[in-house]
Amino acid sequence: MPIITHSTLNAAAQPIERDTSINESCITENKLETANLLGDLEAPQLLECSEQKGEPSNLLDLMNLETNINGLIAAEAVNGAKTMDLVDGLINNSSTNKMSSKPAAPTLSDLDPFDLFSMDASKKPSQPSTIAINTNGIEGVLYVDCAFNENSVAVLRLLVTNNNPLPVEAFNFQAAVTKAFQIELLPPSSSNLPANRQGTIIQMINIRRISTTHPLKMRIKAFYKIDGRQQLIECLVPRIEGLS
């Protein structure tokens, strides 16, 4: 059997070199496949600086940003002074609406100190009245419905009430005036008075002035029955409020 030495083995066996061509082609293909896969997942490219400056509204739309200005949502932004004008207009309109919705109440400093006593001057003044009868529970008040007009005629209204717990019957009113005047008594509204001020008698009176030599005075007589007994009232009215 022949003997094979170590040198013979080295000469016979050729060194095996690693073939990298196949591996490189596989790696290249893998890189291409990986690139294709990653290409589907790549994020969109950012806009150019020039596009950002020229179209800020598109950038804001892309980023889906909303600006909150004092509670007002702006869907789009405007450059420069236009934005400030828009914001100022919105704020001014909002403040104007708030102020106009609630009118300011006048304060005491706004009032004229010399006009404090004339605040109720627009109200109708009270009608002049004179107590003509106030005897034995019978009360009569004279009101001036019309002062002396161009015909020198005044119209008076007498309201008679009964403060007694018993009713009054057959009430008869009589009156006389000074010689410078004439008096006319119109028919009364009634001749009976319920008890406890539950009703009134209305007596209309016309007075004509003849001259101004004497002031107006009125003498009154009233007859009536209460509890079946005859009663008499006599009184003098020296002055009637509202007539001069």
Image (spheres, rainbow, N blue to C red):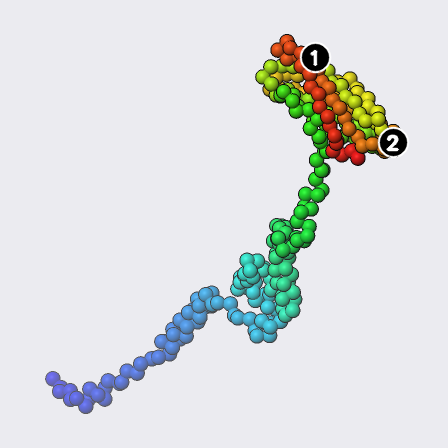
- Residue 170 is labelled as 1
How far apart are the two marked residues, 1 and 2, measured between alpha carbons? 35 Å
- Residue 155 is labelled as none
Task: Indicate the amino acid at tag 1.
Answer: Ala
Q: How many C-alpha atoms fall within 10 Å of the one at disc 2: few (<14), some, or many (≥20)?
A: few
Task: Indicate the amino acid at tag 2.
Answer: Ser
Residue in front for this viewpoint, 4 or 14 = 14
Query: Where in the figure is residue 233, as x and y percent of width and height?
Result: 69, 19
Residue 185 occupies quadrant? top right
Q: How many C-alpha atoms fall within 10 Å of the one at disc 1: few (<14), some, or many (≥20)?
A: some
Query: Which residue was labeled with disc 2?
Result: 211
Q: Secondary structure at mark 2?
A: loop
Q: Is residue 88 above or below residue 31?
A: above
Q: Residue at x 55, y 58 (%)?
A: 71
Query: Where in the figure is residue 94, as x and y percent of width and height?
Result: 61, 56
Q: Earlier in the sequence, mark 1 or mark 2?
A: 1
Residue in front for this viewpoint, 136 or 30 = 136
Query: Where in the figure is residue 111, as x and y percent of width and height?
Result: 66, 53
Q: Is residue 223 something that shows in the picture?
A: yes
